[in-house]
Image: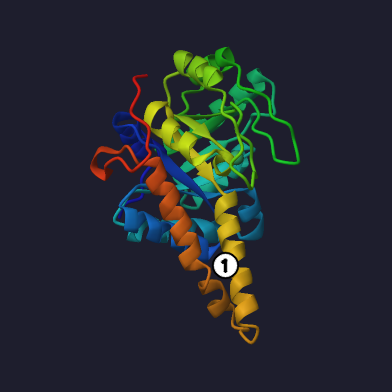
Amino acid sequence: MTVASLKDVLGPAMADHYAVAGLVVLGWEDARAYVDAAEETQLPLILQAGPGCRKHMPVPLLGKMFRYLAEQASVPVVCHIDHARSVVECQEGIDNGFNSVMIDGSMLPLDENIALTQKVVNLAKRHGISVEGEIGIVGYSGGAASARTPPQDASIFERETGIDALAISVGNLHLQTEQKAVIDMTALRAIEAVTAVPLVLHGGSGIPTATRQFLASSSRVKKFNIGTELRMAFGTALRTLLANQPEEYDRINILRATIPASRSVAASVMRELASCKPDKGVIDGAPNLLPY
Ligand SMILES: [Zn+2]
C-alpha cells in the first residue's frame, strides 16, 4: 500500500532536485494509464480530481478508484483534490479517501484567502492530510486573465496558513495546447526568496519541456499540474481508433485503445520532471544544476 501525502512526495523532490507530476484524471482509463506510467518509470505520482471530473463522476466513486490504484502501486501515489473552492468540497474529498487537497482561494482578497485556507488546513491536519493553497491567479487560455503572485503576499500567506505547497502565477496559464508560456524567472526567484514550501505551477502543459526540466532541477517548483497534453493524447488516440475501426461499437474496446497513448505521454512527462533525480541519471539536453 503506497498511498502518500503531498508532503511525502514533495520533500524528497526538494532534497533531490526533481519535480513530481500532478496528472489530471478524467476517468478510469487515464487514471489506470497514469499509474501504469508511474510503475514503468518508478516515480511518484499525484493523481488529481479537478472540478470537471468531480462534476462528472461522484466523489465517493473517484475516492474509491484513486485509493484502489494507489494501494496497488509499488510507488508513492497521492490522491489529490484539485481546485476545491470551499471547506465543504475539501471535507467531501477527505471523507471519501483523498489524502491531499488544493483549496483555491486565489480569486479572494488576501485576508479572505488566508481565512478560508486556514479553515482547510485545520481540518486537514486533524486527518493527516496535505494542503496546497494558491496566491495570484493562474488564468485560462482564451478565458480568465492571470494576476501575478505578489511575493510579499505569498510570504504572509505561507506563514499564516501553514500550507504544504503553494501554487503561484508567474507566466503559467491553464489549458494551453502549445508550449508557449514564458516563465518570469525574476518573479519566481523573488517568491522563492521569501517562502520556504514547495511551489506548484498549474498549466504545466503550456510550459516548454526545457523550461520544465530547468525548473524541476534548479528551482523550488516541485509540482507541475499537467492536464491539457494528456487530454490531447487521449482525444487523438480516440479519433484514430474511431476512424480506423468504424465498425467498433464496444465502449470498452474503444476506450481501452486510448490507454497506451495516455500512458506514454504521462511517462514522458514524469521522466522529464525527474531527469535530474540522482537515481534516474541526467537525460540528454537536461540543464546543469544551478545552486538556489
Ligand atoms: Zn489549476
Instruction: State whether residue 184 is above or below residue 286.
Output: above
Instruction: State whether residue 97 is above or below residue 102.
Output: below
Toward the left, the furthest residue is 279
Q: Is residue 199 left or right of residue 238?
A: left
* Residue 95 visible in the current orientation: yes
Q: Is residue 18 left or right of residue 132?
A: left
Which residue position is annotated with label 1?
Answer: 237
* Residue 45 visible in the current orientation: no
**Could you say which quadrant of the image residue 116 lies in?**
top right
Instruction: State whether residue 137 is above or below residue 49.
Output: above
Percent x, y of residue 235: 62, 63
Toward the bottom, the furthest residue is 247
| Rendered residue at 49%/41% (across/down) | 209
| Rendered residue at 54%/33% (across/down) | 120
Q: Residues within 10 Å of mark 1 (few under 14, many from 20)?
A: many
Q: Nearer the viewer, residue 88 or 278?
A: 278
Percent x, y of residue 223: 46, 37
Q: Nearer the viewer, residue 47 or 283?
A: 283
Instruction: Check disc 1 and give the amino acid type.
Output: Ala
**Could you say which quadrant of the image residue 104 lies in?**
top right
SS for dot 1: helix
Percent x, y of residue 36: 38, 61
Q: Is residue 181 left or right of residue 4?
A: right
| Rendered residue at 48%/34% (across/down) | 211
Quadrant of the snapshot with the N terminus:
bottom left
| Rendered residue at 37%/19% (across/down) | 292
Q: Nearer the viewer, residue 72 or 140?
A: 140
Ligand 1's quadrant:
top right
In this picture the colour scheme is rainbow
**Could you say which quadrant of the image residue 242 lies in?**
bottom right
Percent x, y of residue 98: 47, 48
Toward the right, the furthest residue is 143
